[in-house]
């Protein structure tokens, strides 16, 4: 259990934090208390990626992998992935037209 100087133990819902509040003239150090539930954690402040960004990153990754395929295998690395993508794109186009 956390302790604040000579203060008694506090329940788990409270957390004790030392806050350095100083002026430029005098250096006052005061003890303040804060609810653990009111503090922002790193997980809460972390921004979520938008769906557009995820789609863009996936497309860029696919293009980079295709470029690596061309670099490693030459011309077959260019046309074999394109031939493999034909049925996938065909199914996607059918799904789009169905609504």
Image (cartoon, rainbow, N blue to C red):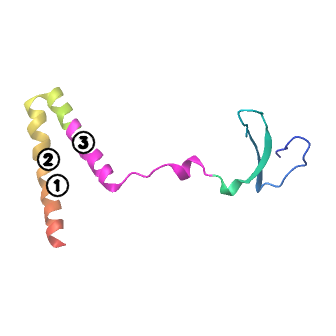
Q: Position of residue 34 (x, y in %)?
A: 73, 52
Mark number displayed over residue 43 = none
Q: Nearer the viewer, mark 2 or mark 3?
A: 3
Cβ–Cβ under 8 Å for marks 1 and 2: yes
Q: Is 90 drawn above or below residue 76 in the view shown?
A: below
Q: Which residue is mark 1?
A: 88
How many marks overall? 3
Mark 3 or mark 1: name the one nearer the start of the chain: 3
Q: Nearer the viewer, mark 3 or mark 1?
A: 3
Q: Which residue is mark 2?
A: 84
Q: Nearer the viewer, residue 80 or 98?
A: 98
Disc 3 to disc 1, C-alpha distance: 18 Å
Is-magenta flag for residue 83? no
Please give the name of the residue rendered at 11% of the width and 44% of the height, measured from the top-left corner: 82
Disc 2 to disc 3, C-alpha distance: 18 Å
- The quarter of the picture where residue 38 lies is bottom right
Assign a secondary structure to mark 3.
Answer: helix
Assign a secondary structure to mark 2.
Answer: helix
Disc 1 to disc 2, C-alpha distance: 8 Å
Q: Main secondary structure of the magenta part?
A: helix
Q: Is 84 drawn above or below residue 20 in the view shown?
A: below
Q: Nearer the viewer, residue 11 or 84?
A: 11
Magenta-tinted stretch: 40-64
Please give the name of the residue rendered at 16% of the width and 72% of the height, measured from the top-left corner: 98
Badge 3 density bin: few <14, some 14–19, many ≥20, Cα 10 Å: few
Q: Which residue is mark 3?
A: 60
Assign a secondary structure to mark 1.
Answer: helix
Q: Is 79 drawn above or below residue 97 in the view shown?
A: above
């Amino acid at each position: 259990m956390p302790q604040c100087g000579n203060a008694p133990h506090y329940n788990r819902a409270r957390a004790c934090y030392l806050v350095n509040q100083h002026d430029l003239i005098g250096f006052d150090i005061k003890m303040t208390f804060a609810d653990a539930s009111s503090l922002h954690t790193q997980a809460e402040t972390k921004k979520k990626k938008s769906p557009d960004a995820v789609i863009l990153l996936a497309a860029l990754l696919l293009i980079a992998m295709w470029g690596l395929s061309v670099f490693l295998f030459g011309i077959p690395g260019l046309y074999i992935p394109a031939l493999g993508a034909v049925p996938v794109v065909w199914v996607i186009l059918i799904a789009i037209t169905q609504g």
